Amino acid sequence: MPMNEYRLNKVPFLLAVCCILAGLVIGRSSPLDTGPAGAPDHAADTNTLLPRVFLDGHDEWEFIIGTNLKVCAVLLTGVLSLGFMSMANLAWIGLSIGWVVRSVMDSGMSWERAAALTVPHGLLELAGFAMIAAVGCEGFIIVYRKLRFDDWSFSMDRLSLNVRRLTAGLLLVLAASMVETYITGQIAAVFN
C-alpha cells in the first residue's frame, strides 16, 4: 500500500475525533445561556421525548442500545453527504457533552465524580461513533481519489478497512451500552 493511501486511510477517523474535540471545547467554553432571548422555559414540562427515563436492568439496556444504534444509523447516512453530516453530528455530540460538563462544573460537582460517571462508557461510545462516522466519510474519500488520482476504483483493501471500522464501531457502542447500563449505576451508588 503506498504511503499516500496509508495516510488517506487515517484521515476520516482523525477528522471524526477532531470534530468531537472541537465540539467539546466550544461547548465547554461557551456560556449556557446562549439561546435566543425570551425563549420559553420548558424545565417544568413533562419529558415527552424520553418517556421511560428511569428504567432498570434489561429494559434500560434496550433503551440505551436502541438510542445508540439510532445515532450510529444517522452517522452512517453521512455517506450521502460525503461525510459532512457525520462530522456535523459528531461536532454536535461534542458540543452537547461540553455543555453538560460546564453545567455539572457550575453546579459544584467535583471533577472526579463527573468523570467517574461519564468516562467509563463515554470513551467507548465516542470511539465507536468516530469509527462509524469514518465509514460515513467514505463518499468524500471516493470523490477525493477521483479528483486527485483520477481513479474511481474501490479496492478490496478499502472495503475490508470499512467493514473492520463498522464492526469495531458497533462492538464499541455495544460495550459502551453495557457499561452504561450495568457499571455506571454501581459507580453512582458508591458516590451516594
Image (tube, rainbow, N blue to C red):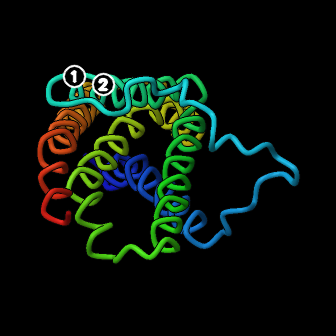
Mark 2 nearby-residue class (10 Å; few <14, some 14–19, many ≥20)? some
Task: Give how far across and how far down residue 9 sits, in percent.
Answer: 34, 46
Q: Work out how far the residue at label 2 is from the one at label 1, CA to CA, in angstroms.
A: 6 Å
User: Would you say 15 lies left or right of 33 here?
Assistant: left
Horizontal and vertical percent position of residue 59? 21, 22
Which of the pair 24/148 is nearer the observer?
A: 24
- The residue to which callout 1 is attached is 59
Say what amino acid the circle numbered 1 marks. Answer: Asp
Relative depth, front residue between 85 and 159: 85
Disc 2, disc 1: CB below 8 Å? yes
* Rendered position, 47 above or below 121: above
Give above or below for 132 relative to 188.
Answer: above
Tag 2 secondary structure = helix
Q: Position of residue 153 (x, y in %)?
A: 41, 24
The residue that appears at 43% across and 26% down in the rendered structure is 76
Q: In this orientation, which residue lies closer to the viewer: 173 or 88?
A: 173
Which of the 4 quarters of the picture holds residue 56? top left
On the image, the x and y values in percent for residue 30 come to: 66, 69
Query: In the rendered image, which quarter contains the C terminus?
Result: bottom left
Residue 63 marker: 2
What is the number of callouts on the image?
2
Q: Secondary structure at mark 1?
A: helix
